[in-house]
Image (spheres, grey):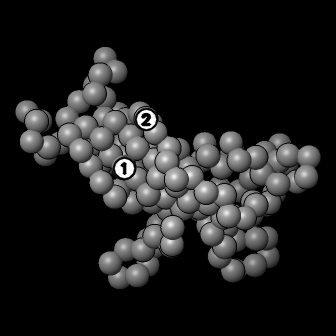
Amino acid sequence: MGFLATKDGERGEPAVRTVPMPSDANSNGDIFGGWVLSQMDIAGGIIATRQAKGRVVTVTIDAMTFDRPIQVGDLVSIYGHVSATGTSSITVEMETIVQRQYSEEEIKVTGGQFKFVAIDSEGRPRPLPGSSNSS
């Protein structure tokens, strides 16, 4: 999975940008994979919610890769874009980029594909706006 890019070759703005703290690290000083996964789920949810124009839930996480560790104090930026939609589903491709403390170099550390489903107020799948089954 390469860098995500817009039509003009730029990644655009991150959906989430944060800095992990010591409480997010394991005994080796690396950030827990679960912490990274939760941040990516938040970012994907933001993107999917905008697409769905309403509530969404995560249904699958596919093709998740951890290429490099994240360290306490890294600036973590999570980028994503909608890669596919169905009647009620939205697939978001994401990657996590870090800048180490005191460095401007960007390093890709993770990537993944998250699938969300638009739901109604009762928690049932609902058609996406503009889909052939929406009213």
Residue 81 placement (x, y as % from top left): 39, 60
Location of the C terminus (image quadrant): top left
Whole-number angstrom distance, CA of label 1 to CA of label 2: 10 Å
Q: Residue 1 carries which label?
A: none
Disc 1 crowd rating (10 Å Cα; few below 14, some 14-19, many 20+) is: many
Q: Name which residue lies at 23% across and 30% down.
A: 126
Residue at the image point whose x is 44% and y is 57% from the top = 93
Left or right, 86 with respect to 25, comes to: left
Q: What residue type is labelled 1?
A: Thr
Return the residue found at the far right. Answer: 27
- 54 relative to 72, above or below: above
- Comparing 91 with 53, the one in front is 91
Asked whether the viewer can see residue 42, the reply is: no
Label 2 sits on what residue type? Val
- Which percent across, then down, holds residue 63? 52, 53
| Residue at left offset 50%, top offset 73% | 3
Residue positioned most to the front = 63
Decide which of 57, 15 is in the foreground and name it: 57
Q: At numbered mark 1, what does the secondary structure look like: helix, strand or loop?
A: strand
Image side of residue 14 versus residue 124, left or right: right
Which element carries disc 2, helix, strand or loop? strand
Q: In this view, does 34 lie to the left or right of 62?
A: right
Badge 2 density bin: few <14, some 14–19, many ≥20, Cα 10 Å: few
Residue 99 in view in this figure: yes
Residue 91: mark: 1
Q: Name the residue under label 2.
A: 59
